[in-house]
Image: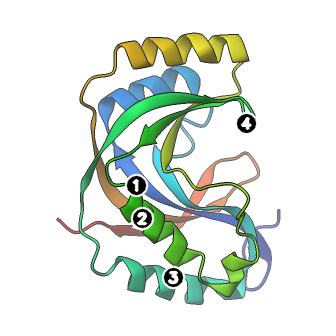
Amino acid sequence: MQPFSGGLYMEISIMLEIQNQQITEIRSLYDNLYQKVPAHITLVFPQKIHGTDIPVIKNHILNIFKDVNEFELHVSKYKSDFTYQNIQAIISDVDEVIKNLHDNLYVLPVFSKARRHDIPYVPHITVARHISRSLSERIVNNLNNSLTELDIKLVSVIFEKILPDDGSEVLFKIPMSS
């Protein structure tokens, strides 16, 4: 991927950045992107856009999130995703709010063509990546057995450029209002 300079294509993602010490600790053990990408819930999955689309996307994000205040959510369970070899912390209590944000972002033509209608959107936080099935099953079992009330704070919306090393360059960030 070439660096952005006026009109080149880039791979991007839009996410809700979260804060929670327990999630951070789990990711530090099992997520190889722990130091490159903040803990988050993906709203727009990675896809290529043209650099000239950035202003339209930014305005759309600002419109969607102008009335969205900071809120807390809870992890209901941990689940293995064997297809992608990861573990997800599943969000359940405000999932409709997050699903609506996701749906509203995919209204933009630049995103709508890449939307996957064959895969249901499930709000989650990836806490482990690239792990074997047997290790995943053990970790999920341990996490679910020790699951306590896990309050997670949403702190911002991030529009990022995905770097060649899978790191993240923030194109812009909108703090959630208190």
The first of marks 3 and 4 along the sequence is 3
Identify residue for label 4.
Answer: 84
Q: Secondary structure at mark 3?
A: helix
The first of marks 4 and 1 along the sequence is 4
Q: Secondary structure at mark 1?
A: helix
Identify residue for label 3.
Answer: 58
The first of marks 1 and 2 along the sequence is 1
Estimate the spatial distance between the alpha carbons at disc 1 and disc 3, rounded to whole Å: 23 Å
Task: Specify the amino acid type for callout 2.
Answer: Val
Estimate the spatial distance between the alpha carbons at disc 3 and disc 2, rounded to whole Å: 11 Å
Residue 4, by quadrant, is bottom right
Estimate the spatial distance between the alpha carbons at disc 1 and disc 2, rounded to whole Å: 16 Å
Residue 157 numbered mark, or none = 2
| Quarter placement of the C terminus | bottom left
Q: Is residue 23 above or below residue 15?
A: above
Front residue (pair 83, 47): 83
Task: Specify the amino acid type for callout 4.
Answer: Tyr
Task: Specify the amino acid type for callout 3.
Answer: Lys
Quick one: label 1, few (<14), some, or many (20+) residues within 10 Å? some
